Image (spheres, helix red, strand yellow):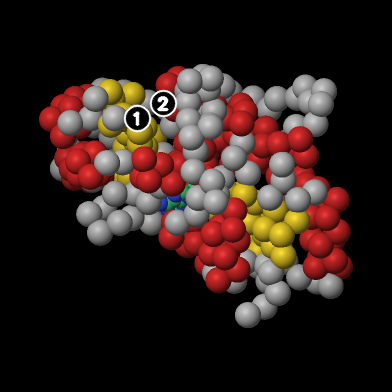
Amino acid sequence: MPEFAIVRTVADLRAQVGAWKRSGQRVALVPTMGALHEGHLSLIALAKTRAERVVASVFVNPTQFGPNEDFDAYPRGEARDAELLAGAGCDLMFAPGVAEMYPQGFSTSISVTGVSEPLDGAARPGHFNGVATVVTKLLLQCGPDVAVFGEKDYQQLQVIKRLVRDLDIPVEIIGAPTSRLEDGLARSSRNAYLSETEREVAGRMNLALSEAVRRLKAGESVERVEATGRAALERAGFQRIDYFEVRNADDLSHPGPGTLSGPGRVLAAAVIGKTRLIDNMAVE
Ligand code: AMP
């Protein structure tokens, strides 16, 4: 197996990436919060097709969690993550501590307006500022040629594409398709929170989304599809529905109540027990 290393400081990360670039190798970055699963590993596999070297960051970013969210409970397991990354052919794991990322006196926040405002932006105030800030830092720390993000977090992917364009960060952002379990549930580190009965309810979210895609393609109105989708999640047993919405695919603006004309995306977020799940699907 090729050599695999773990670094914990920005200086060590830069030294290794700099050496690779000087020898003409392209570098890909895959940012994660650890608790890795096959979805993350599919991003590593995609990254390997686009660069000679792959860096994965593992950092549970405190600034993207709200005060009453699951930062403390978020699953962590660095040794297992390192093993999975090495096995997937990743070259370097960047696992900084909180003080390396946010040293005393840290005062800057990146805020992307527009695309980060609806959906998860409305349901989780401050979340996308935390994401935008940490991703900007990771891109500047690593300086990759490409960075890979999952479509599982579709709004996050659009926020990152926007900030990279707006700040002229020289990196290509690549979206990777959502990796799913047998019943269609999107793989997620948070699935580990689900009890057996909750796991069954969780599996119905992707069915509600694919039904919405089918109805939109058949010409049903956005308004009706959203109402039917919300009702389906309620019937399935979700206790709180943050949103079930149809949006324009590129900027996530709302297409209005009539029939969808251009490329769209159906996005949902709902809570079962203590677990908040999100998922989305394309309407091509
Ligand atoms: P996370 O560790 O959950 O912050 O996710 C790290 C990266 O993996 C993000 O770009 C996610 O969109 C992506 N990701 C998470 N789950 C999946 C999945 N099931 N399929 C594809 N990508 C995923």
Q: Nearer the viewer, mark 1 or mark 2?
A: 1
Label 2 residue near ligand 1, CB within 8 Å: no
Disc 1 under 8 Å from ligand 1? The reply is no
| SS at mark 2 in the image | loop
Quarter that holds the N terminus:
bottom right
Task: Tell me the element at label 1.
Answer: loop
- Examine the rendered structure and indicate whether residue 146 appears above or below residue 4: above
Q: Quadrant of residue 135?
A: top right
User: Residue furthest toward the left?
Assistant: 235
Task: Provide the residue designation for mark 2.
Answer: 119
Q: Nearer the viewer, residue 121 or 39?
A: 39
> Mark 2 is on which residue type?
Leu
Position of residue 271 measured from the top left corner of the image (x, y, whole percent): 31, 29
Residue 78 visible somewhere in the drawing: yes
Residue drawn where x is 35% and y is 33% of the image: 275
Q: Residue at x 81, y 26 (%)?
A: 104
Residue 274, disc:
1
Q: Is residue 136 above or below residue 234?
A: below
How far from the left and from the top, in percent, is residue 144? 72, 55
Q: Is residue 222 visible?
A: no
The residue at the point 41 percent across, 42 percent down is 190
160 vs 7, left or right, is left
Precedes in sequence: disc 1 or disc 2: 2
Q: Residues within 10 Å of mark 1 (few under 14, many from 20)?
A: few
Is 110 displayed left or right of 47 in the figure? right
Q: Residues within 10 Å of mark 2 (few under 14, many from 20)?
A: some
Residue in the image at 61% along x and 36% along y: 61
The residue closer to the viewer here, 62 or 137, is: 62
Q: Percent position (x, y) of residue 85?
A: 58, 64
Res 107 label: none
Q: What amino acid is labelled 1 in the image?
A: Lys
